[in-house]
Amino acid sequence: MSLLVALSQWDAETWRVRFKTALPKHDIVVLGEPFDRRAVHYVASWKHPAGALDGLPNLATIFSLGAGVDHLFADSRLPNVPIARIVDPDLTTRMSEYIILHCLLALRQHRRYAAQQLIRSWDDDRNQPAAKDVRVGLLGLGVLGLDAASRTGHNGASFRTFAAAEQLPEFLAHTDILVCLLPLTDGTRGLLNLDLFRQLPRDGRLGGPVLINAARGGIQVENDIMTALDEGSLQSATLDVFETEPLPQDSPLWNHPRVTVTPHNAAMSEPTAIVAAIANQIARIEAGYPLENSVHAARGY
Amino acid sequence: MSLLVALSQWDAETWRVRFKTALPKHDIVVLGEPFDRRAVHYVASWKHPAGALDGLPNLATIFSLGAGVDHLFADSRLPNVPIARIVDPDLTTRMSEYIILHCLLALRQHRRYAAQQLIRSWDDDRNQPAAKDVRVGLLGLGVLGLDAASRTGHNGASFRTFAAAEQLPEFLAHTDILVCLLPLTDGTRGLLNLDLFRQLPRDGRLGGPVLINAARGGIQVENDIMTALDEGSLQSATLDVFETEPLPQDSPLWNHPRVTVTPHNAAMSEPTAIVAAIANQIARIEAGYPLENSVHAARGY
């Protein structure tokens, strides 16, 4: 049985070596070289070219090499087989670090104190908000969102979420820091737009709503973020993801004084952990156990 | 029975009103006005002038209006009566926030990504350290240190401390981020000096040792911090406290590219919480219970 490594950006040879080490009894083949298509039972994909998985008659499972699977559904000819995504404790921890770091930067007014340091100003401001005065609203309560919520709670902030779409307005009306960890689907594309930002309260303790998006750039409308920052419906934004990545050189987000840009590295995972998770799944499947962390194709995540 | 509010910097009238609200059956008097010195059973002090507590024959307890008591021992004529400091959950939470924030800023290379953003550089660096690869060493395991350690542990980092002075070299040799939450005493004055910094390992995952001091400025030697930053025995420093406060305008710390200066506001407490804690102590004393959070004069904290 073969595992096909199907990539468009990363170095396939490096991944072949990693998989060969973890799965010594399997053939590891990569897109672009000749291989027996009937022998391929598994695909490990990161943004494979559309159609590249055609003609694999014995394909049983597709593994995403990341936590997101929107790159798979971008292939309209994706074979109709079970799909699994990566759930890795290391990746989850890094994402929670990122969320906590950027919530604390907002809470503790880091931008203000960095600006004060530049002008040698000693202004301690004895009226700082406490964590309990700031409401963190989390969009997306999957593995990543639940971990971030749990850890944010440990650190004293209150966090809120909502269960049904009709609760969204009330959720937004009580959110000072809006954290997005949603998957990108037809239902979430463009969700973070001006209409939504205008539903956030401007009278919270942080001087205006704060947006943190560490999910997918397709969920945000960047023109609307700029408008919201200028009109005050957003006070600041921390973005790890963008409509186009790398973020184009002419994007006004780069040098907006209240925007933090990070290069889609909120939660990287070590390749060895990814490969170990997939090898473990294959061992489970071949021992007769069900697939874990499977994706519902109909809902898109 | 009277409570004497003994301040040198803060507004005494504001504190008188707060104490009168919390202790309606007690007389509240302030330094500088005439009062019956024999009626004073309690003093609430923040940096009272040396000698100001002479001639209080019935003084039973001195309360510090902050977590630190070094300001009391700066008065060589301090009456020999029980002393209590403030232990306030809100102050403790804020201190832990500060420690976690500045540990995460170092771990997640915030200074680097902020610099990249300024030059519109998209460099994600797929080799970021994980929290588990970074060793946080905490000097000072009192109420604040234990809370910070507990919460840092929740967030995935390993932390270390030591129990006896002879363990300090081994402790330092395995510390990537050195966090100081010690009290200022004769034993800790000037402890954070070049000799100590040179015992920190330079080969950790953060590119060099990181210092975070949120305790007291008297514990650090600022000339040595500058030397250590220049020679590489410190990679960066986050300082909330300074030998002289406010930090003098001509201090080279203000504009060192790897120093973060905050204006001694890592952990402010709300005055109402401080007053409530002292009123609660007085009620306990008058009901016959022992003083809580008492200070050992001989050890200085």
Image (spheres, coloured by chain):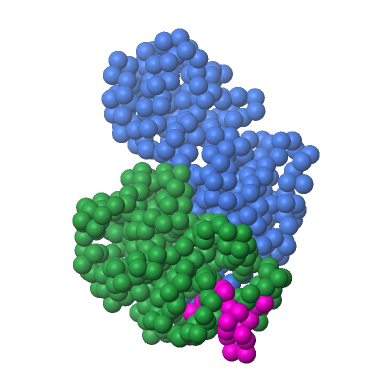
Chain colours: A blue, B green
Residue at 41% from the left image edge and 82% from the top image edge: B77
Residue B23 horizontal side relative to residue A61, left or right: right
- Which stretch is magenta? B27-49
Residue B41 lies in magenta, yes or no? Answer: yes
User: Compared to A188, does A258 lie above or below?
Assistant: below
Q: Give x and y (percent) for residue B126.
A: 37, 45
Residue B224 horizontal side relative to residue A174, left or right: left
Residue A81 lies in magenta, yes or no? Answer: no
User: Compared to A1, does A199 lie above or below?
Assistant: below
Q: In this orientation, does residue A225 appear?
A: no
Q: Give x and y (percent) for residue B3.
A: 61, 75
Q: Give x and y (percent) for residue B192.
A: 29, 68
User: Compared to B228, does B28 lie above or below?
Assistant: below
Q: Which residue in the rendered view is the most extreme toward the top? A: A288
**Residue A71 versus residue A119: which sits nearer the camera?**
A119
User: Compared to A250, does A276 lie above or below?
Assistant: above
**Residue B56 versus residue B170: which sits nearer the camera?**
B56
Q: Quadrant of residue B225?
A: bottom left
Q: Quadrant of the C terminus of chain A?
A: top right
Number of marks = 0
Residue at 43% from the left image edge and 52% from the top image edge: B146
Q: Give x and y (percent) for residue B104.
A: 43, 54
Q: Quadrant of the N terminus of chain A?
A: top left
Residue at 52% from the left image edge and 81% from the top image edge: B56
Q: In this orientation, does residue B164 appear?
A: yes
